[in-house]
Image (cartoon, rainbow, N blue to C red):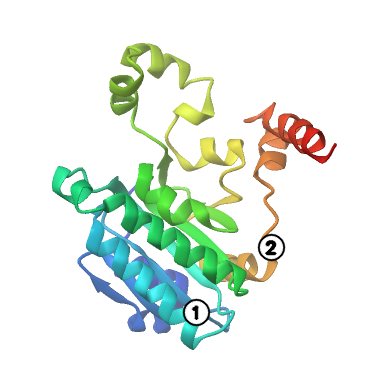
Amino acid sequence: MKKPSSRAMLAKLFGPSSRAVSVNNSVLTGYATTGGTKVCVIGTCDGVYVDNAAALRLAAHVIDCVEKHPKLPIVMLVDTAGQNPNRVSEMLGLASCFGHLLGCLELARRKGHKLITVATGQAVAGAFLCYGMFADRIYALDSASVGLMPIAAMSAVTKIPAPVLQKLSKTMPSLEFGAEPFALLGGVEAVWSAKDDVQSKLAKAIAAATTEDNRAELGKKRGGRKLALDIRKKVLAAAAR
């Protein structure tokens, strides 16, 4: 399935107002409207690797939104191959830059901003974790490739042969890449077809979003995470004694 260009995707989500969203080195920042609702937009496109500068640029825009537009919904668009695989970036504090971005998003949440993610392309690894996965609700286009770690990289870390992991991925959604497997896990609220009226779907998603974490419930209901909800309940019950 051919992925639409970044400008075409922005136009599909935000209509003419998408022209106010800046695309700078594949980093998205700006303000737009969807379904008559003004939103703050941050994100990435073109499958870019997120480096220190990109993380700080996204964080700065979140701060701008919190300071100038109280309680404005923040829409996070994700199309990234992950964090910048560069030793220099890591030595210059890439993890700290990601942590700063997460801190800014948590501040926004506590200030009443709804956080909505739409995975439009690749949504992979640390870069997905540092902003997209932090949302109140996560949605994905059916063309999106959502996952935590490519099998080759997972094999290198765990020392489990890649063919074994590949076989396990057929029955374990957590190892498989794609929007549907992550929806089974509850990590994706719903998968949208790029052919649908995604602007209307996004507006409805923003209106319905809450800060309640429903991912374990969804995972159990859909059969992708059968134990997480019950274990969480046991832990919470034990902590309350």
Q: Nearer the viewer, residue 214 or 119?
A: 214
Q: Tag count in the figure? A: 2
Could you say which quadrant of the image residue 232 lies in?
Answer: top right
Q: Nearer the viewer, residue 172 or 100?
A: 100
Q: Position of residue 74 (x, y in %)?
A: 51, 71
Give the residue at x 33% y 31%: 150
Q: Nearer the viewer, residue 37 or 233?
A: 233
Q: Do callouts 1 and 2 mark residues in contact (Cβ within 8 Å)?
A: no
Judging by the rendered image, the residue that carries numbered circle 1 is 66
Q: Residues within 10 Å of mark 2 (few under 14, many from 20)?
A: some
Question: Viewer-nearest of labels 1 and 2?
Answer: 1
- Farthest residue in the right direction? 241
Query: Disc 1 versus disc 2: distance between alpha carbons?
Result: 18 Å
Q: Amino acid at mark 1?
A: Val
Q: Position of residue 113 (x, y in %)?
A: 58, 73
Q: Is residue 233 left or right of residue 118?
A: right
Judging by the rendered image, the residue that carries numbered circle 2 is 210
Q: Is residue 32 above or below residue 219?
A: below
Q: Amino acid at mark 2?
A: Thr
Q: Position of residue 212 (x, y in %)?
A: 70, 56
Tag of residue 46:
none
Q: Residues within 10 Å of mark 1 (few under 14, many from 20)?
A: many
Give the residue at x 43% y 73%: 62
* Disc 1 secondary structure class: helix
* Disc 2 secondary structure class: loop
Q: Is residue 137 above or below residue 12?
A: above
Could you say which quadrant of the image residue 201 lies in?
Answer: bottom right
Give the residue at x 48% y 58%: 118
- Farthest residue in the bottom direction? 68
